[in-house]
Image: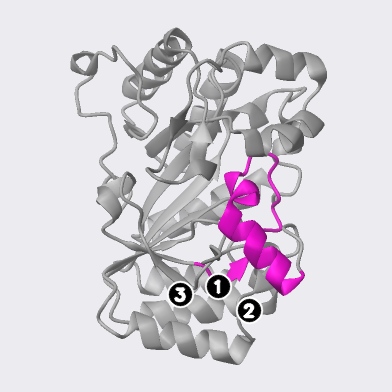
């Protein structure tokens, strides 16, 4: 049977909490169209885009809007879903659906549903109405806003990684307001690239910025390379920058991030590169009294977990 994106899907074994959650995918594709996005190369995504005659950077609804809202309402009130993650293959705050009000309609349904926890991970910008809704239902939502410290560099060698995103200032202000309203709010430093995002002139001023916005919870996750993102990353980076980044990766060893899914085969940074970067980032966060974790799905050999005053490997619950 041909693999397709489905409206609801159980979490995969090998991911956070060993899959004890569900994903919601109301559409396929994402306007942010980030060059490093793994979703673009996933078999299910491409099969569904082809079926809907759609392009990745112009998302298409899985069903007509009225039917989509009905299906979502029925499933989130069925009692079958406890934790819901938005989303695996897209961003719930992709601009066209924020502007049309559809993202807000989804969240209204989820707010009043039987689902206990809604986890939003986004590079997008929520509307005023969405911020107000999340503030009202603060106990229901976990808000995870993704940024890269390299945005502080001038010039920024990764500038094309963020060219389709809303302004940094607006996204930080939205995260601050949601946090101040009482929603658990975590800043995801993702994708994090060693020796670029952890440069003193990138990381330290970005942490200053987070402190100014009272955002003191951080998770960071290193970029994994996969065959499916190589072409788009190559188009987004100057040749010398790409060569420099690739020199720090181990292309002699691949691993499937999710068991049994061949399209999740990826390559990680060389272990010594990752160790040095983790130490630098964790030290900076610790010195500033941030709460922080490192994504534990990207394993690093020889990490000295006793060096830091807390368990810094994420078990999935840090941002839930």
Looking at the rendered structure, the secondary structure element under dot 2 is loop
Figure coloring: one colour
Which of pointers 2 and 1 lies earlier in the amino acid sequence?
A: 1
Which one is closest to the eye, mark 2 or mark 3?
A: 2
Numbered label attached to residue 26: 1
Asked if residue 232 lies in the magenta stretch, the reply is no
Which one is closest to the eye, mark 2 or mark 1?
A: 1
**Residue 239, quarter of picture:** top right
Which one is closest to the eye, mark 1 or mark 3?
A: 1
Residue 73 place in picture, x, y as percent? 42, 86
- What is the CA distance from the residue labelled 1 to the residue labelled 3? 19 Å
Residue 10 place in picture, x, y as percent? 35, 63
Looking at the rendered structure, the secondary structure element under dot 3 is helix
Looking at the rendered structure, the secondary structure element under dot 1 is loop
Asked if residue 44 lies in the magenta stretch, the reply is yes
The residue under label 2 is 101
Which of pointers 1 and 3 lies earlier in the amino acid sequence?
A: 1
- What is the CA distance from the residue labelled 2 to the residue labelled 3? 13 Å
Circles 2 and 3 in contact, beta carbons < 8 Å: no
* Magenta extent: 25-53
Circles 1 and 3 in contact, beta carbons < 8 Å: no
Position of 199 relative to 289 (above/below): above
| Depth order, front residue of 268/94 | 268
Q: In the image, 46: left or right of 89?
A: right
The residue under label 3 is 133
Give the residue displayed 30% in from the left and 75% down from the top: 115
């Amino acid at each position: 049977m041909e693999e397709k994106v489905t409206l609801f899907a159980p979490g995969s074994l090998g991911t956070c909490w060993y899959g004890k959650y569900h994903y919601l995918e109301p559409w396929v594709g994402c306007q942010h169209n980030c060059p490093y996005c793994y979703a673009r190369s996933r078999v299910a995504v491409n099969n569904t885009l082809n079926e809907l005659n759609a392009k990745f950077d112009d998302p298409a609804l899985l069903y007509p809007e009225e039917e989509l809202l009905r299906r979502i309402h029925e499933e989130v009130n069925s009692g079958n879903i406890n934790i819901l993650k938005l989303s695996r293959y897209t961003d719930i705050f992709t601009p066209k659906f924020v502007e049309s009000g559809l993202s807000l309609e989804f969240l209204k349904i989820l707010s009043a549903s039987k689902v206990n926890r809604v986890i939003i991970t986004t590079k997008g910008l929520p509307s005023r109405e969405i911020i107000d809704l999340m503030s009202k239902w603060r106990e229901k939502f976990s808000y995870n806003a993704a940024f890269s410290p390299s945005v502080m560099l001038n010039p920024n060698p990764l500038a094309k990684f963020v060219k389709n995103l809303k302004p940094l200032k607006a996204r930080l202000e939205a995260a601050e307001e949601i946090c101040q309203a009482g929603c658990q709010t975590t800043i995801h430093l993702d994708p994090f690239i060693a020796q670029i995002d952890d440069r003193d002139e990138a990381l330290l001023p970005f942490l200053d910025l987070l402190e100014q916005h009272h955002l003191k919870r951080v998770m960071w996750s290193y970029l994994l390379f996969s065959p499916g993102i190589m072409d788009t990353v190559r188009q987004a980076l100057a040749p010398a920058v790409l060569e420099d980044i690739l020199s720090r990766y181990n292309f002699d060893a691949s691993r499937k991030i999710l068991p049994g899914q061949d399209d999740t085969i990826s390559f990680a940074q060389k272990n010594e590169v990752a160790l040095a970067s983790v130490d630098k980032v964790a030290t900076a966060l610790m010195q500033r009294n941030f709460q922080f974790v490192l994504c534990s799905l990207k394993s690093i050999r020889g990490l000295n977990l006793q060096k830091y005053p807390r368990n810094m490997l994420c078990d999935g619950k840090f941002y839930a």
